[in-house]
Image: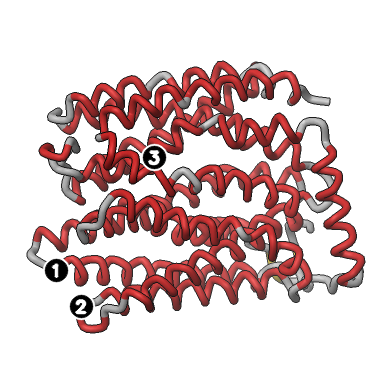
């Protein structure tokens, strides 16, 4: 689609829907992956229960590959995106309502979280597909920086932002339920505003053409494309990379929020919600952004195949610092933040190689569906360890658990060594 005049008088506002859409996209994910573990920790749940809960919600997101073909047949993409955004906003308001002390319902909360994961997965697939299909290579390149910025902004608002608001309310003697209910209401209000911007941006898009192929033809093309992906000689090496490359980091990130909030007597860093939110903002969000830039620069200079192994080695090296911290948890916030900042910069650079490898193999007909299959495997590789991570940390204690994460770096480096030979540009 071209940038310019539409219906003789209107200009496309690609920047507006890219900003609004990808900001919106990260809010449900940040609430699930960042805010929820902290909320459950505040409520006194065990590490085992917390990591399992987050993992089960993640599995729902991973199921998107099964309904992705159906979504490609479901009406006009922009209308579907707005429908799912409306549903997500309503679910966030409902979640805040069910958490409040006067209307607290565990079953209603669980069902709402499940539906929220379901709708957010559908929204992600549709938005990613529309971004790829409606813009040419130059337009995508021109808006890639805005996409990255808006994603990070959404992550900040719904992750550290919501956690900080809840922590601030707790210091003012609010109950845990009230503190988190009010914070989630704020997140829902943000999605309502951003959704309005999305509608305005889409009004300036060209009219979506009707689908020319029949549902049977479309499904046949999709399954043919997926079959080509399965037969691709690079796919086994890529799947190994997806599963093992960040195995140690996955086990780490499932426990870091709980380790940060636990008391010194339980081996934790004993941070409150506000301290953790600020640390998360200045280390994880900033570190991942810097790391992504560094990783992209290295790959552009050396090539993907020559960068995977060095970036993988540098990604795992800072785990030594986190392990040291588990043995010596009574440290200043500056020391703690410095260790985690280095860790997230290295992780951001390493993960950049994995994402680009997935995109390289996913290229071709129906790239959105091919990438959805690979991202499903990636999502499962992130959430499956949560089924046992909390239990292991409870049984082993934080020091021994983080030593285990160091040993898990070995299969990650082996997978990188194998993949580098298979992913040379063809």
Residue lying at 70% horizontally and 50% vertically, measured from the top left: 373
Q: If you read the primary sequence from the N terminus, does the residue marked by circle 2 or circle 1 appear first?
A: 2
Which x, y percent locates residue 377?
63, 46
According to the picture, the residue beneath numbered tag 2 turns out to be 101
The residue tagged with tag 1: helix, strand or loop?
loop
Neighbor class of circle 3 (other Cα within 10 Å; few <14, some 14-19, many 20+) is some
Residue lying at 43% horizontally and 47% vertically, measured from the top left: 386
According to the picture, the residue beneath numbered tag 3 turns out to be 253
Residue lying at 19% horizontally and 56% vertically, measured from the top left: 167
Q: In this view, which residue lies farthest toward the bottom?
A: 102
Q: Are marks 3 and 1 in contact (CB under 8 Å)?
A: no
Residue nearest the observer in this picture, 364 or 62 = 62
Residue 6 appears in the figure: no
Mark 2 vs mark 3, CA separation in Å: 30 Å
330 lies above or below 24: above
The residue tagged with tag 2: helix, strand or loop?
helix
Mark 2 vs mark 1, CA separation in Å: 8 Å
According to the picture, the residue beneath numbered tag 1 turns out to be 175
Residue nearest the observer in this picture, 242 or 286 = 242
Q: Are marks 2 and 1 in contact (CB under 8 Å)?
A: yes
Which x, y percent locates residue 178?
20, 71
The residue tagged with tag 3: helix, strand or loop?
helix
Position of residue 101 in the picture relative to residue 64 (left or right): left
Neighbor class of circle 2 (other Cα within 10 Å; few <14, some 14-19, many 20+) is few
Tell me the quadrant of the picture where the N terminus can be found. Answer: bottom right
Q: In this view, which residue lies farthest toward the front?
A: 395
Number of numbered tags placed on the structure image: 3
> Could you say which quadrant of the image residue 210 lies in?
bottom right
Residue lying at 36% horizontally and 66% vertically, measured from the top left: 187
> Could you say which quadrant of the image residue 248 lies in?
top left
Q: If you read the primary sequence from the N terminus, does the residue marked by circle 3 or circle 1 appear first?
A: 1
């Amino acid at each position: 689609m071209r940038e310019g005049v539409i219906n003789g008088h209107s200009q496309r506002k690609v920047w507006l829907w890219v900003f609004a859409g990808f900001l919106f996209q990260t809010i449900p994910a940040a609430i699930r992956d960042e805010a929820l573990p902290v909320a459950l920790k505040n409520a006194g749940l065990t590490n085992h229960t917390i990591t399992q809960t987050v993992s089960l919600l993640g599995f729902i997101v991973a199921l998107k590959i099964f309904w992705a073909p159906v979504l490609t047949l479901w009406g006009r993409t922009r209308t579907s995106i707005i429908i799912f955004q409306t549903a997500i906003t309503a679910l966030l308001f409902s979640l805040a309502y069910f958490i409040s002390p006067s209307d607290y319902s565990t079953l209603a909360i669980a069902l709402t979280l499940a539906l929220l994961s379901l709708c957010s997965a559908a929204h992600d697939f549709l938005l990613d597909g529309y971004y790829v299909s409606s813009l040419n290579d130059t337009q995508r390149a021109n808006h890639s920086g805005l996409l990255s910025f808006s994603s990070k902004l959404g992550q900040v608002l719904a992750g550290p932002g919501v956690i900080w608001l809840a922590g601030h309310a707790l210091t003012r003697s609010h109950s845990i339920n009230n503190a988190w209910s009010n914070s989630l209401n704020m997140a829902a209000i943000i999605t309502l505003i951003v959704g309005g911007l999305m509608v305005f941006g889409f009004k300036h898009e060209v009219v979506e053409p009707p689908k020319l192929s029949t549902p049977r033809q479309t499904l046949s093309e999709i399954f043919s494309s997926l079959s080509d992906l399965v037969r691709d000689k690079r796919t086994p090496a890529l799947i190994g990379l997806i599963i093992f490359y960040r195995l140690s980091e996955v086990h780490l990130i499932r426990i870091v929020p709980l380790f940060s909030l636990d008391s010194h007597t339980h081996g934790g860093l004993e941070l409150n919600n506000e301290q953790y939110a600020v640390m998360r903002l200045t280390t994880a969000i900033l570190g991942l952004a810097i790391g992504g830039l560094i990783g992209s620069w290295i790959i552009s200079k050396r090539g993907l195949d020559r960068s995977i192994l060095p970036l993988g080695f540098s990604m795992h090296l800072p785990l030594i610092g986190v392990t040291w911290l588990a043995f010596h948890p009574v440290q200043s916030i500056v020391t703690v933040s410095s260790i985690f900042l280095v860790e997230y910069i290295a992780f951001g650079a390493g993960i950049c190689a994995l994402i680009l490898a997935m995109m390289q193999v996913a290229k071709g007909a129906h790239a959105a569906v091919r990438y959805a299959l690979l991202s499903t495997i990636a999502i499962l590789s992130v959430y499956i360890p949560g089924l046992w991570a909390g239990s292991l940390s409870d049984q082993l204690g934080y020091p021994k658990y983080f030593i285990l994460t160091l040993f898990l770096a070995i299969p990650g480096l082996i997978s990188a060594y194998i993949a580098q030979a298979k992913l040379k540009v063809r």
